[in-house]
Amino acid sequence: MSDQNRNLASPHVGEHPRHTRVAPQRFGEGLSFFLAATLAVTRYVLGGPPERGGSGVLAAAALSAVVAVPGLLSLLARNGPRGLLLVASALALVAVQLTWSVTLPMIVSAALFLVAYLERRPSSQRSAYGTLIDAIAAIVAAIVAGLGVAALFMQQDPVEYATATERGSVGDIITVSEAGLSLVASGAIIAVALSVRLFYQKGRKPGQRGSPREAKL
């Protein structure tokens, strides 16, 4: 078989073959989703009376979205641009800032996504340019995610409450508007990632899993 035929038969044209080792990446994704679910449940179940009801559900969803988005971006990167892995790594580090008692293990996810990104380095001579674009995208996404996290803690605490059986105060209240702003930030990141992945897949040849365009993102 000629070298040209071998290249056409190879499913990984345009990027380093080691990217097929996805088990660590999957572990990072699973950890991200597990911590997101854990954070949502603990926030709602262990929260005070002001943190229950519809607003409590929205607050839990906003918190968990910050932690789940890195895992989702890693999923999109499996058959998408490698740059999403670098963005996922940066967002995982942002998620660590939510609550150290729950989200500290996101450091592991961040490291695994970064390793997966490095292992998928393209063979193109434009790899340096592509890495720069990836880094810029990661920084911008981290800023947006950071603003979403900051939005969750805009209201001055503590908040006093009174029910038929008790009276007290609760700190770290997340209002509906705060949760909404954070969800908008998370949704914007996901929407852009989906658009980039769609554009990437349209630019590939049918049946081709790797592409020289990988260097761009």
Image: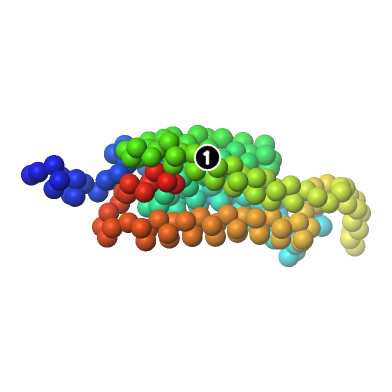
| Residue occupying image coordinates x 18% and y 49% | 9
**Dot 1 crowding, Cα within 10 Å, few <14, some 14–19, many 20+:** some
Decide: is 22 above or below 167. above
| Residue occupying image coordinates x 32% and y 49% | 211
In the rendered image, the quadrant that contains the N terminus is top left
Q: Could you tell me if residue 100 is visible in this image?
A: yes
Q: Position of residue 150 (x, y in %)?
A: 74, 47
Residues 205 and 129: in front is 129
Q: Residue furthest left?
A: 1
Residue 161 quadrant: bottom right
Q: Residue furthest bottom?
A: 54
Q: How is the image coloured?
A: rainbow
Would residue 82 be found to the left or right of residue 39 on screen?
Answer: left
Element type where label 1 sits in the image: helix
Q: Position of residue 39 (x, y in %)?
A: 64, 48
Q: Position of residue 74 (x, y in %)?
A: 47, 48
Would residue 156 be found to the left or right of residue 35 on screen?
Answer: right
What amino acid type is highlighted by mark number 1?
A: Ala
Would residue 150 be found to the left or right of residue 134 on screen?
Answer: right
Residue under pointer 1: 135
Q: Could you tell me if residue 103 is visible in this image?
A: no
Q: Position of residue 169 (x, y in %)?
A: 88, 49
Q: How many marks?
A: 1
Residue 50 quadrant: bottom right
Residue 136 quadrant: top right
Residues 205 and 28: in front is 205
| Residue occupying image coordinates x 34% and y 37% | 125
